[in-house]
Amino acid sequence: MTKTTTAIIDAIKAADRILVCGHIRPDGDCVSSAVAVRLLCAKLGKTADAICGDGERPVTFEFLPEYDKFGKIGHDKYDLFIAVDCAADKRLGDGLKYLSAATNSINIDHHPTNDGYCKINHIDPSACSTCAVLYGLFADSGLIDRDIATALYSGLSTDTGHFMHSNTTVEVFGIAKALCEYGIDIGAVNHAIYCSKSFNKIKLTARALSAIQLHEDGRIALMIISQEDMKACGCTSEDTEGLIDNCSSIKGVEIAVSMCEQPGAVFRVSFRAVKANVAAAAEKFGGGGHRLAAGCIINGNRYDVADKVISAGRAALAKQA
């Protein structure tokens, strides 16, 4: 085991109350990482709580082991705080107050913009996902079992776009193989993540697809999902997760952008790219992420926000040329 692995295990063993926390508006890697670390704590004889940001609990991942225990706060204060897949402490949402009050803290992540805001920090920007980082940390610890492997595989799969994104490497397939050898039900996991959508989400998808806009001779695709769209389909912001992939799949599109309207004239914006640096585009609006996948929050009406994101995408394409 590495020195970092030993330090993390020692910190968990020394703690009485542990909280594992991922970022607000969690994706699959975030949820899976939090679930995996809570299970690791249990393997070390500790009871831990696990949440993401402001208490979000995506139904897509209800298949994960012991998910009924996820998203619940059991104490007013924790002596060990473990942040997973969260590039900045401000993205911990309500979890930030528990970090501030904790005696010790651990930060495990793969985002290159992570500034190491905890006492123990393990950031690996070369990893495809935080679940891959966790596998690297604990592969030789003897702690990984079928349940933990199931969670790690889920995060590995979602953050590589089911092994279709450019961050999929030979190493990633090696990790997937190793996790599968723990006996996880790959078919069940894949079906739960990718083939088990509510009818309401299907309706929202159809509505969003019909309104996709193409700009810059088809090089930029824009999807706008309004509060009215979500209300009409009986959906919430959680149901917009993954819709941007439909824009990315259009032939000729180099940058895909989705704008999801939040209450109060606020838009959650996601960028995806083939080659262009969309992290730089997101950073213009106070966001960030990876070179080919990033996000931000922009205030304003839909037309002004659309103009801003298209302009940012155009600039990213120009720098790529």
Image (tube, rainbow, N blue to C red):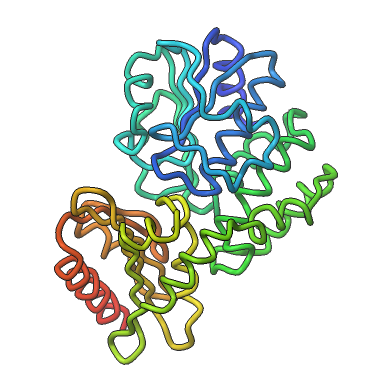
> Which of the 4 image quadrants contains residue 115?
top left
Compare residues 279 and 124 and report the one nearer the observer.
279
Question: Seen in the image, is 214 located left or right of residue 300?
Answer: right
Question: Seen in the image, is 47 located left or right of residue 303?
Answer: right
**Image coords of residue 85 (percent x, y):** 47, 41
Marks counted in the figure total 0
Question: Seen in the image, is 215 located left or right of residue 85?
Answer: left
**Image coords of residue 59 (percent x, y):** 57, 44
Q: Is residue 38 above or below residue 310?
A: above
Q: Is residue 299 above or below residue 317?
A: above
Q: Residue at x 57, y 9 (%)?
A: 14
Q: Residue at x 39, y 40 (%)?
A: 24
* Quadrant in which the N terminus is drawn: top right
Q: Residue at x 20, y 66 (%)?
A: 302
Residue that extends furthest to the bottom in the rendered view of this protein: 217
**Image coords of residue 58 (percent x, y):** 52, 43
* Quadrant in which the C terminus is drawn: bottom left
Q: Is residue 156 above or below residue 79?
A: below
**Image coords of residue 210 (percent x, y):** 41, 79
Q: Residue at x 19, y 75 (%)?
A: 311
> Which of the 4 image quadrants contains residue 10?
top right
